[in-house]
Image (cartoon, rainbow, N blue to C red):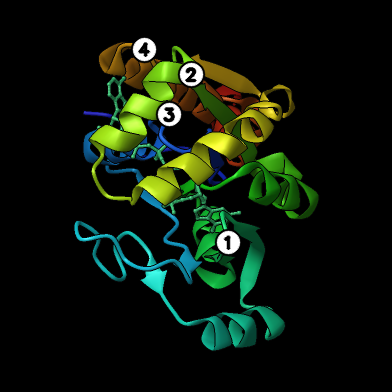
Amino acid sequence: MRMAPIDRRGLMLIVSSPSGAGKTTLSRRLLADDPAIHLSVSATTRPKRSNEIHGKDYFFVDEATFVEQRERGDFLESALVFGNYYGTPRTEVVKAVEAGRDVLFDIDWQGAQQLAEVMPQDLVTVFILPPSRQSLEDRLRSRNQDSEAVVMDRMKKADSEISHYAEYDYVILNDDINRASSELKAILMAERLKRQRQTGLSQFVRSIIGT
Ligand SMILES: Nc1ncnc2c1ncn2[C@@H]1O[C@H](COP(=O)(O)OP(=O)(O)OP(=O)(O)O)[C@@H](O)[C@H]1O
Ligand SMILES: Nc1nc2c(ncn2[C@@H]2O[C@H](COP(=O)(O)O)[C@@H](O)[C@H]2O)c(=O)[nH]1
């Protein structure tokens, strides 16, 4: 059995990609396999998809509510993406990181840039690429959740999304889902071991060397 863990600060794992490249699929796998990380559930004004649950996938709110929350400072970051507003609730994230818990974010490059301004030391950023343009379009259609107009709009914006890949710490090619999923887990494991996140290290080391 492992001894009591060394105190640590939580990390913020941001996963971004063009729409349809697979970040939600990869995020769900990571959450299912690793109970020590939890998802930051965003608020959005986008209509709910048939397979989504309020409070689990998103907090679905109307525009007036979103604007009120944003003006009150409830969001750590917020952005207009594909014509809808999205925002990351502030309190839960700050509390979790300070308590040493890791948080996963499925957000776009605008959100990643804003979080880098407020909590830079805590961020680990990962960009997911599709294997080809055609596979991106096929995946958006095969998801079967959006109208043709929405699929076309997201494909039109894919180039501009992809152009932000170089702002990220890591890039994963999501060709084979099992491999991409293992790569994401490996990033998380290595980042957890970074010395500066292990805030209880000096105390622990002192207990070993007996000074
Ligand atoms: N490696 C893969 N091979 C084949 N299909 C995949 C792969 N990864 C994801 N998919 C499929 O592609 C579709 C889009 O994936 P997903 O919803 O995870 O994308 P996303 O990046 O989260 O999109 P959005 O930004 O619109 O939320 C889903 O139907 C998913 O099952
Ligand atoms: N900046 C933010 N972007 C967000 C947030 N939540 C989701 N997103 C991004 O929006 C698009 C579309 O998502 P979809 O669920 O409507 O397909 C995608 O790129 C998400 O990563 C957020 O809180 N802030």
| The quadrant where residue 94 appears | bottom right
Does the closest atom of ligand 1 sit within 8 Å of the Cβ of label 4? yes
Q: Which mark is residue 175?
A: 4
Labels 4 and 3: the sequence-earlier one: 3
How far apart marks 1 and 3 lie (CA) works out to 19 Å
Labels 4 and 1: the sequence-earlier one: 1
Packing grade of label 1 (10 A; few <14, some 14-19, many >=20) is: few
Residue at x 53% of width, y 87% of height: 65
Does the closest atom of ligand 1 sit within 8 Å of the Cβ of label 3? yes
Residue type beneath disc 3: Ala
Residue type beneath disc 2: Arg
Residue type beneath disc 4: Asp
In what element is the residue under mark 3? Answer: loop
Labels 3 and 2: the sequence-earlier one: 3
Residue for badge 1: 83
Task: Report the number of discs.
Answer: 4
**Quarter containing the C terminus:** top right
Residue for badge 2: 133
